[in-house]
Image (cartoon, rainbow, N blue to C red):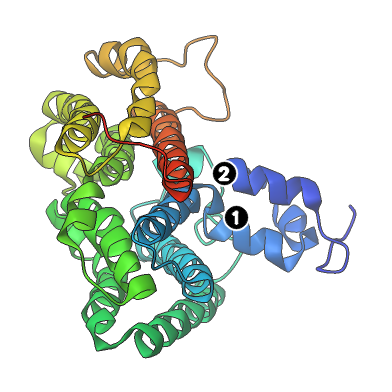
Amino acid sequence: MKKYSLLHPNWDMWKQAMIGIPRVKSKSEWDALDTFSRWLISTRAAVILMTLFSAIIAGIFAAFDGMFDWPRFLILCFGLAMAHATNNILNDLSDHRKGVDKGNAFRTLYGTQPVEDGLITQQQSAKMALFTGILAVAAGIYLTWQAGWSVLPFFLAGFVLLFAYNWPLKWLGLGEPTVILVWGPLMIGGGYLAITGQWSWDVAIASLPYALGPTAVLFGKHIDKIPWDKPKGVRTMPVLLGEKAARFAVIGMIALQFILVVALVIKGFFGWPMLITLFALPGFFKNILPLFAKDKPKERPADYPEDVWPLWFSSYAFLQNRTFGGLFLLGLLIQMILMMFDLPVGIF
């Protein structure tokens, strides 16, 4: 088996880890990977894209107001990505220690869980989380120093929620509301503050259409996990609501994304380019509405990817979020470019 290193990385594994969750079949295969490949897999790097979108959105809002700052923006992107990565490592470590993933559970069926699969020890996982977390904290300290003490409450809130999500919030049905807060007002509103040094309620409100996307993805994942979570006392919101109510909650959240965008365009906060997000509606009507309105198939459909199953609701929510998030970002970029050339973006 070929041995990789940082000087001779496994580029194919880097690519796999950035677009999905690769399955490492053995300890020898894991040991042959370069260090960065192991880190990408351990942090579930593919889902960190949702966090980077929040940072980029914050930067575009700052550019709207003529207060964009490249160094602060890049540090913000780096810091938020490291914070999310740390949370993912700690989530797997916490679930392993509490026995949530024991016995070939849901999480280990569709992707590598390094601790549960015996690829790394708990101590190694903790050290990885510590290293990644230190990078996130360093970014937060820098932004607080540069933008002012008004950033500190957001920095501290993010630090607390980094640990509190895994326990007790996720276990008490509070993890999903936390995601709306984190991916919206905290990341985008706080990111805008870190870049500009100013707080904006308009930005905080305008962050909600995007924040609902990651929340829907998490809802979908926790709906998929109900058969594993409920017997082990993990009371996520889908467990508390019940599967049917949780499925319709996801439909409502994704529909609300479109409603909020249109409302913000009518209000004048967004310009007409943001209506490009409506091109995500076909995916909503084709996949989200019909699939979330009925039960999950008992067996994997023949045309459904084997390496994704038993993910079902979460995978469709993720694809929908990627489409909506990409269009949301594209609309903001178009609006920013038009504003740079003093071209009209309002609908009235």
Q: Is residue 327 visible?
A: yes
- Considering every residue shown, the one lying at the far front of the view is 342
Residue nearer the viewer, 3 or 203: 203
Work out whether mark 2 precedes mark 1 in sequence or the reverse, and give the earlier one.
2
Looking at the rendered structure, the kind of residue marked 2 is Ile
300 up-or-down from 104: above or below = above
Q: Which residue is mark 1?
A: 41
> Splitting the image into 4 quarters, where does residue 184 fall?
bottom left
Residue at 28% x, 68% y is: 190
> Splitting the image into 4 quarters, where does residue 292 fall?
top left
Please rate how many residues cluster around mark 1, counting C-alpha atoms within 10 Å: few if below 14, some from 14 to 19, many from 20: many
Residue nearer the viewer, 104 or 186: 186
Q: Which residue is mark 2?
A: 21
Residue at 21% x, 43% y is: 231
Please rate how many residues cluster around mark 2, counting C-alpha atoms within 10 Å: few if below 14, some from 14 to 19, many from 20: many
Describe residue 308's horizontal placement relative to residue 99 as left or right.
Answer: right
Q: Which quadrant would the C terminus be assigned to in this image?
A: top left
Residue nearer the viewer, 53 or 174: 53
Query: SS of the residue at dot 1?
Result: helix
Residue 51 at x, y percent in the picture: 42, 55
Residue 22 at x, y percent in the picture: 63, 43
90 up-or-down from 50: above or below = below
Residue 55 at x, y percent in the picture: 42, 59
122 up-or-down from 46: above or below = below
Q: Is residue 181 visible?
A: no
Residue 288 at x, y percent in the picture: 31, 19
| Marks 2 and 1 in Cβ contact (< 8 Å) | yes
Query: SS of the residue at dot 2?
Result: loop
Describe residue 313's horizontal placement relative to residue 29 as left or right.
Answer: left
Looking at the rendered structure, the kind of residue marked 1 is Ile
Count of labels in the image: 2
Describe residue 124's horizontal placement relative to residue 239 as left or right.
Answer: right
